[in-house]
């Protein structure tokens, strides 16, 4: 059963997304190539003062090793400071609820989560973290982690477009421009819009009220709108409140929901167009964007049909368990797919209550490597790994040395590609096996059978691919899961960034070969077909067995009248 109004909403969403992504992509190109743009006169002086304040020589170029060390230094410093803020929370200001200090393992897990752009939350925000930690700890890291993803992508673009050199830009300049020209302006616009829709932005203590029934209720408040804006735009996903974007004070209206889910994939989509502008290859960018869009639409379609088909147990009734009535099935499914393709992790419905097929789509979106738009920056440099795989395979098929934008792809690059692709996958499978075998892992599972397997598999798929969403039902706030998901998040983030930086360091030194009749073109529908095939085959070969005995088996058993 397909409702016409749902399809019209989807078409409106896609039209808004594609249009805004293209416009922003052109703007991003002007920002990072130093061209005059709409904000140059306002932000230009602030940018120069920032370099002076930080003691940065904006003209100094870095090679890939210098750039990587600067990146690791800033991320490491952020990790230490965020852990310290949580451990000292009870001594810090802006804590009207007098919340106590956070335990060490949860503090470390949370710090890793926000530094790696994962925003996995093993805690309830409104009962665990103060206003100070939410603003100066989590929100700051939301900006820095998103800017880091953009910075790595810029290095890759320069490596591809540079004719035999070593310079790959300046990390501090790229970070400053990403934050000042992109993330802050868009977040201000988004935050103001959210406040207009009723998202709370307050420093008052929590409200204590009496309901109509006479029960006492505490309504959490706080500076939520400012954090929600960057959590969506930066593909961070960490909710200010425990119920995340299902909570009325975080996502109160249809339009707040529409624009929040749009903002989740907006910057990742715009960066694909920026990629084309910066490399003067708009057609190739459109092909890559098209592949991402096709996989996204396919995920929405499969999930929507699965939810609308209902279940024999409920005589075909549309599945509304775990969903907000004010959003309904379509907006819940659109969000579930968008948040898992885009490495965002925010939710407006309980993913554990989705049909098994819809849950499988969410897991597969993450397990493919968060490359269907993916995180800010990280989605496209993750897709680049699959592009190189496709180019390499195609080159072998036609008996020619593989090339990408005239750069020869050789054994050294492919070793790094395989490392970056395999590290997150191995972490997901090995850590999930540990969670399903060891007593401490099994103790956190709430549901038996294949659904319990899915809870653990989803958790590590989310952590290792820096998504952050949860299947619910799993008690993740234990030392076992705090330690293992923390390790998974670090491996998933820096186990990909370092290989991508190494590949960039190798490519930038290579000359650009001229295009000949034998060059395998990457701006054709044939390339789009091959790229899609490589993505799906790698994902299927890696995760098909465990998905078959998890959500696949649960779907079959549901038809026999058994639920978990």
Image (cartoon, rainbow, N blue to C red):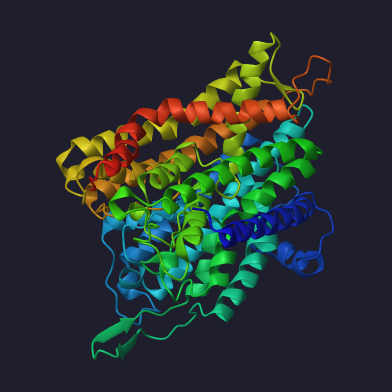
Q: On the image, which quarter does residue 280 sit in? A: top right
Q: Position of residue 231 (x, y in %)?
A: 51, 62
> Is 138 or 375 nearer to us in this picture?
375
Q: Is residue 188 above or below residue 466?
A: below
> Is 143 or 462 nearer to us in this picture?
462
Q: Position of residue 395 (x, y in %)?
A: 67, 15
State left or right for residue 34 relative to residue 188. Answer: right
Q: Is residue 277 above or below residue 325?
A: above
Residue visible at 84% across and 20% down? 514
Q: Position of residue 96 (x, y in %)?
A: 35, 82
State left or right for residue 470 relative to residue 493. Answer: left
Q: Position of residue 242 (x, y in %)?
A: 36, 66
Question: Which residue extends farthest top?
Answer: 399
State left or right for residue 76 relative to residue 407. Answer: left
> Is 85 or 551 nearer to us in this picture?
551
Q: On the image, which quarter does residue 504 sit in? A: top right
Residue visible at 77% across and 26% down? 164
Q: Is residue 466 above or below residue 89?
A: above
Residue visible at 31% across and 69% down? 128
Residue visible at 63% across and 44% down? 293
Q: On the image, which quarter does residue 407 sit in? A: top right
Residue 505 in view: no
């Amino acid at each position: 059963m397909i409702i016409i109004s749902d399809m019209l909403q989807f078409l409106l969403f896609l039209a808004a997304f594609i249009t805004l992504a293209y416009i922003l992509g052109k703007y991003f190109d002007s920002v990072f190539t130093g061209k005059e743009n709409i904000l140059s006169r306002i932000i230009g002086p602030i940018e120069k003062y920032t370099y002076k304040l930080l003691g940065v020589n904006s003209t100094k170029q870095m090679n890939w090793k210098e750039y990587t060390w600067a990146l690791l230094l800033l991320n490491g410093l952020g990790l230490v400071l965020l852990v310290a803020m949580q451990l000292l929370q009870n001594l810090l200001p802006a804590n009207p609820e007098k919340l106590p200090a956070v335990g060490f393992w949860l503090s470390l897990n949370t710090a890793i989560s926000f530094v790696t752009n994962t925003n996995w939350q093993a805690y309830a925000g409104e009962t665990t973290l103060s206003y100070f930690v939410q603003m100066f700890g989590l929100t700051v890291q939301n900006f820095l982690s998103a800017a880091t993803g953009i910075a790595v992508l810029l290095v890759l673009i320069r490596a591809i477009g540079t004719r035999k050199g070593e310079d790959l830009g300046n990390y501090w300049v790229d970070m400053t421009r990403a934050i000042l020209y992109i993330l802050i302006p868009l977040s201000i616009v988004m935050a103001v819009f959210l406040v207009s829709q009723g998202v709370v932005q307050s420093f008052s203590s929590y409200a204590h009220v009496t309901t109509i029934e006479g029960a006492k209720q505490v309504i959490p408040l706080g500076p939520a709108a400012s954090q929600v804006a960057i959590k969506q735009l930066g593909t961070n996903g960490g909710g200010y409140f425990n119920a995340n974007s299902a909570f009325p004070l975080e996502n109160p209206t249809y339009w707040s929901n529409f624009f929040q889910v749009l903002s989740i994939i907006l910057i990742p989509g715009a960066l694909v167009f920026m990629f084309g502008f910066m490399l003067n290859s708009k057609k190739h960018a459109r092909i890559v964007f098209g592949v991402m869009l096709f996989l996204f639409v396919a995920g929405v379609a499969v999930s929507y049909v699965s939810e609308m088909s209902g279940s024999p147990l409920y005589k075909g009734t549309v599945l509304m368990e775990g969903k907000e009535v004010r959003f309904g099935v379509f907006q819940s499914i659109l969000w579930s797919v968008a948040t898992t393709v885009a490495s965002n992790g925010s939710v407006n419905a309980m993913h554990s209550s989705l049909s098994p097929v819809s849950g499988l789509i969410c897991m597969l979106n993450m397990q493919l490597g968060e490359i269907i738009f993916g995180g800010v920056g990280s989605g496209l440099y993750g897709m680049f790994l699959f592009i190189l795989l496709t180019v390499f395979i195609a080159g072998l098929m036609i008996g020619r040395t593989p090339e990408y934008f005239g750069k020869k792809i050789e054994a050294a690059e492919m070793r790094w590609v395989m490392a970056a692709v395999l590290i997150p996958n191995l972490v997901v499978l090995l850590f999930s096996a540990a969670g399903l075998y060891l007593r401490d892992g099994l103790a956190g599972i709430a549901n038996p059978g294949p659904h319990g397997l899915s809870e653990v598999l989803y958790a590590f798929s989310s952590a290792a691919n820096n998504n952050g969403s949860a299947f619910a039902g799993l008690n993740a706030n234990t030392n076992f899961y705090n330690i293992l998901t923390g390790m998974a998040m670090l491996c998933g983030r820096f186990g990909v960034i370092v290989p991508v930086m190494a590949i960039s360091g190798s490519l930038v030194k290579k000359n650009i070969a001229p295009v000949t009749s034998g060059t395998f073109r990457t701006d054709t529908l044939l390339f789009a077909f091959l790229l899609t095939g490589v993505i799906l085959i790698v994902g299927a070969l890696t995760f098909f067995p465990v998905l078959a005995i998890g959500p696949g088996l649960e779907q079959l058993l549901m038809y026999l009248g058994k639920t978990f």
